[in-house]
Amino acid sequence: MALKGKENKPGWIASINPWVLRIVNNPERLAFVLHRITGVLMALIIMAHIYVTGIPAHTGWEAWIEEIQNAHGITPVTLYFFFFAGIAWFHGLNGIRLLLVEFLGLCIGEPEKPKPPYIAPSLKGCQRKLLYLVFALWAILWILTGYILFVA
Amino acid sequence: MVSASKRLLLQYVTAILLIFLLTWHLVIRVPALRGVDTFMETLSAKLVYGEISSYGVLLLVFAYVALLHGFNGLRNVLLEWTGGRYSKPITIIIVILFIVFASLATYTVVGITPPG
Amino acid sequence: MSFDPKAATKIPPKKVTFRIKRFNPEEDREWWEDYEVETYRGMTVLDALLKIKEEIDHTIVMRYSCRMGVCGSCGMTINGMPRLACQTQVAEVASDGKPVVTVEPLKNHPVMRDLLTDFTKFFDKHRRVKPYLLRKDVDERETGDYEYEMLPEEHYNIYEYTLCIACGLCYSACPVVASTDRFLGPQALAYVWRYVADPRDEAWKERLEMIDTDEGPFSCHYAASCSAVCPKMVDPGAAIQRLRSALIKYRLGLYKKKRISKKVGPMEEKKPRKDLPPEAKPVDGVDPWAKDQEPVKIPVEKLI
């Protein structure tokens, strides 16, 4: 009797939870998960954004003007813009890195002979530095956005 | 059927366009560049109408490119999550959504009237 | 997988608890079981598992062979990271603060029993990418009289990909394989790039067109987990990115293989044999010149 093995796949949860496996020296996986989550959210938010900005063309400017007048400071409208901007910043910045890595095949090091400490060239390549730059710029730009939205 | 390389090429080309379009779209919301004091004032009816009437074509290109990039990516993600089982219904829904939102964006730019 | 000599040469905690995920297919039962093992300096996780099998519980099922990271049989998820059990020191994964090592079967491969996983799908995908040299001339490939020239720097380009031992760790770490069966996986795609970049292979166009589907490199999103877990430093992640950009360039008419090497040889010239000395008597029924006859050639179908 041939035994059929039990499937042992984490499924789609593996692409939204970076800790399904605890792999050391792998921030790219975190970036992949964040890129996917922000990508799906962006697709949904773009739809909402196009619908909302289309309202003045359908029913006139009254609702728009009233909404803008009440939306100063920390309100649902500014919070929505704040998270929209944060999601867009990460997806865009990491997207530039992915264009270099995936589209042009750059920044992934050169093939080399294995020698201690046996770290794959693509993990030592400049895409890793770009990844840290992406996280740093993301934080800076998001804070700046928050400053413009809530303080200025 | 479009080959996988063509679909991904579309994704990368729209991504390159979006870098510039999104930067422009976000930078024009900086209050200091528009001569106003707060972020919310850049969204006033007068300024927004001025944008739509003078940069309408650019805004439309932005909307189409963003929708192409977003829905193409969303389709890829959904196909991956479902293991490629419902490829046809997912593609049909995505195409319908694209047509609906692209025509909504077109109507916004074409049918806008001045405020007041 | 990075190697930290300081962590690997430490003395492990005296007693380490191995928490092993077990599975019984007859009862369809899954459970965790703890075993306490006395360790020694230089003990690997595979040594510990074998000690458990010998001394405590002989019903544990696992696959292993060479015990030195060559055969690629003993891949397991150790403390949540796919590793080769024979290459993992207990001192690396257990500390005095937390002397517990969890051992699970590899993810993404179907589990047969305990730590034993089924590699059928994995090797099917490996076979589908035709992991061997393809030449237009079938005859020269089959007779084995010829060699193909290759410069050292060309060898250098593909050397790290030739080190793959098909242990299945990259396949187990990949988040795309985790959600869909329709991805060939890092190992198979690294092999495609290894032959596309190899100057001795003539089928680069066919290989590039073969993988231009949803199964191919476009399903990869560069999570780079494959490169991070590879015990042989093969770097499948980089191979897939190179393959992807080569394929896009090829579709735009910009990619061309740099060089396809020519055959050299035949390497051994056939010399006429000397006659047997007069005192040598051939055994009855054995023809001493049988080797000089032309070998029987079985016609092989054209592959490209």
Image (cartoon, coloured by chain):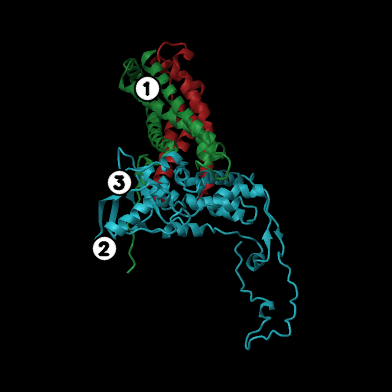
Chain colours: A green, B red, C cyan
Q: Nearer the viewer, residue B114 or A140?
A: A140
Q: Are marks 3 and 1 on the same chain?
A: no
Residue B38, compared with residue C165, is above or below; it is: above
Residue A56, compared with residue B76, is above or below; it is: above
Q: Are marks 1 and 2 on the same chain?
A: no
Badge number at residue C140: none
Label 2 chain ID: C
Badge number at residue C16: 3
Q: Amino acid at mark 1?
A: Gly
Q: Nearer the viewer, residue C71 or B98?
A: C71
**Residue at horizontal 52 percent and vertical 57 percent from the top:** C129
Label 3 chain ID: C
Q: Quadrant of residue A125?
A: top right
Q: Are marks 3 and 2 on the same chain?
A: yes
Q: Which residue is mark 2?
A: C26
Q: Which residue is mark 1?
A: A60
Q: Nearer the viewer, residue B46 or C189?
A: C189
Expressed as whole percent of the image width and height from the top left, the position of residue A55 reads 37, 26
Q: Amino acid at mark 2?
A: Glu
Expressed as whole percent of the image width and height from the top left, the position of residue A65 reads 35, 17
From mark 3 to mark 1, how far is it between C-alphas?
72 Å
**Residue at horizontal 30 percent and vertical 42 percent from the top:** C99
Q: Residue furthest bottom?
A: C284
Circle 2 crowding by C-alpha within 10 Å: few under 14, some 14–19, many from 20: few
